[in-house]
């Protein structure tokens, strides 16, 4: 959505921060399937009974998902892996627990029910649209003319750093910053470095 907006309305923004941003559904799905396959292998060898059980549950789908034709079913298959494997999103799962605690505290402070965390209507609605399930936005890169920061976690299993490099190569003048010990949420796992990088862009 960020790419679409900046490409269409460049005069409406001062700059663009592409933070672990989606550039292609097919590429992202491929990345999720590949990362999931590796985690399922690790789970099978884990000393944790919980991890072994997870790997056993997901193993039948490791080969199934990538073979699905482009479209909604392939996207939903990738989403199931993404929802089952928090390691795809976090370099350090302790960060996940801390972030979730902050979200819950904020919901309580504003008297918002926790159920909103699991009501993913926008995502499900998009997933039903084959145009979204197969969308590749790389053709928009040349249309982005505002100062751009490409920020990505090196350990992101959903949007791997290779995708960030593609965006940096395609967007003229874009600055690329890859953060180590960081997954899909730089503002959670590397907040200081994320803030510094954004301030450089808008300063």
Image: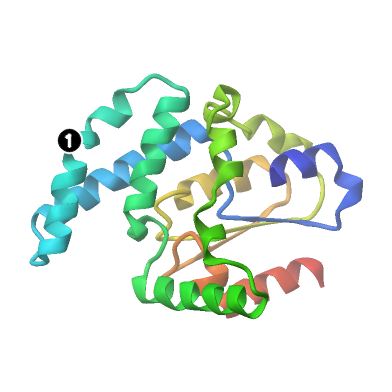
Using the rendered view, name the quadrant where residue 156 is placed.
Answer: bottom left
Front residue of 54/167: it is: 54
Which residue is drawn at the image coordinates 66% and 70% (left, top)?
197
Q: Is residue 152 visible?
A: no
Residue 23: percent from the left, percent from the top? 58, 40
Residue 118 to residue 90: above or below: above
Front residue of 68/73: it is: 73
The residue tagged with tag 1: helix, strand or loop? helix
Left-right relation of 187 to 184: right
Residue 89: percent from the left, percent from the top? 42, 59
Tag 1 residue: 60
Q: Residues within 10 Å of mark 1 (few under 14, many from 20)?
A: few
Which residue is drawn at the image coordinates 13% and 47% (left, top)?
56
Q: Residue furthest top?
A: 69
Which quarter shows the C terminus?
A: bottom right
Left-right relation of 143 to 112: right
Which quarter shows the N terminus?
A: top right
Q: Is residue 185 visible?
A: yes
Left-right relation of 136 to 162: right
Residue 100: percent from the left, percent from the top? 47, 72
Left-right relation of 163 to 63: right
Which residue is drawn at the image coordinates 73% and 45% (left, top)?
172
Using the rendered view, name the quadrant where residue 106 is placed.
Answer: bottom right
Residue 86 to residue 4: above or below: below
Which residue is drawn at the image coordinates 52% and 29% (left, top)?
133
């Amino acid at each position: 959505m960020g790419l679409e907006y900046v490409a269409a309305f460049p005069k409406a923004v001062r700059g663009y921060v592409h933070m672990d941003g989606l550039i292609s559904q097919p590429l992202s799905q491929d990345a999720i399937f590949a990362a999931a396959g590796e985690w399922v292998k690790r789970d099978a060898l884990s000393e944790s009974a919980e991890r072994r059980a997870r790997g056993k549950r997901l193993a039948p789908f490791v080969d199934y998902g990538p073979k699905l034709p482009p479209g909604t079913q392939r996207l939903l298959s990738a989403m199931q892996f993404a929802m089952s494997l928090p390691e795809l999103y976090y370099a350090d799962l302790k960060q996940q627990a801390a972030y979730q605690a902050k979200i819950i505290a904020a919901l309580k402070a504003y008297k918002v029910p926790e159920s909103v965390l699991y009501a993913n209507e926008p995502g499900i609605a998009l997933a039903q649209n084959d145009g979204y399930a197969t969308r590749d936005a790389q053709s928009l890169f040349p249309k982005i003319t505002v100062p751009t920061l490409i920020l990505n976690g090196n350990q992101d299993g959903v949007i791997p750093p290779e995708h960030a490099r593609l965006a940096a190569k395609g967007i003229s003048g874009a600055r690329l910053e890859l953060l180590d010990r960081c997954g899909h949420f730089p503002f959670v796992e590397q907040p200081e470095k994320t803030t510094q990088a954004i301030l450089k862009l808008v300063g």
